[in-house]
Amino acid sequence: MVLYYEIRRRMRAAVVPAVCALVLGYFGYHAVEGERGLVAWSNMVRETRIAEQSLEAARQERQELERRVSLLDQRHLDLDMLEERVRLVLGLAHRDDIIVFDRR
């Protein structure tokens, strides 16, 4: 009978730390693996870096296109650029041009 009471007393003493350990484990798990945890945060940082690189590439492409468009401006027209665009759009060529067909 004494053994029964001793086991019961120790079980009561272990309940509070066990519940606390479970609660800490629950919150600890979700702090790492949860929707807004450390893993999700690191994935978001990686995706942000990729998006910033994509944005920088788009900015560079835009600058290049703006530069090329500025060459076609009426105020200071670059005749070589105009001739290049005419040939590309209309499919025209000089008599002296060598045309190479690509079979893609």
Image (cartoon, grey):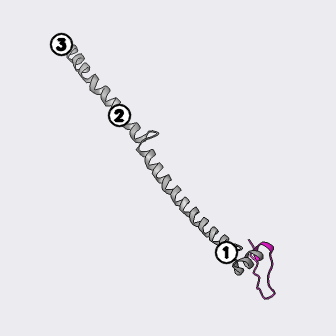
- For the N terminus, which image quadrant? top left
Location of mark 1 (residue): 71
Give the amino acid at mark 2.
Gly
Q: Is residue 92 magenta?
A: yes
Q: Position of residue 26 (x, y in %)?
A: 38, 33
Taking the view exactly as shown, the residue that stands out farthest to the left is: 2
Labelled disc at residue 6: none
Q: Nearer the viewer, residue 17 or 85?
A: 85
Location of mark 2 (residue): 25
Label located before the other in sequence (3 or 2): 3
Label located before the other in sequence (1 or 3): 3
- Disc 1 crowd rating (10 Å Cα; few below 14, some 14-19, many 20+) is some
- Disc 3 crowd rating (10 Å Cα; few below 14, some 14-19, many 20+) is few
Picture quadrant where residue 78 is located: bottom right
Taking the view exactly as shown, the residue that stands out farthest to the bottom is: 96
Q: Nearer the viewer, mark 2 or mark 1?
A: 1
Q: Secondary structure at mark 3?
A: helix
**Distance (Cα) linking label 1 and label 3:** 99 Å
Q: Looking at the picture, does residue 33 appear above or below residue 60? A: above
Q: Looking at the picture, does residue 38 appear above or below residue 54? A: above
Label located before the other in sequence (2 or 1): 2
Please state the extent of the stretch shown in magenta in the rendering.
87-104
Q: Nearer the viewer, mark 3 or mark 2?
A: 2
Dominant SS of magenta comes to loop
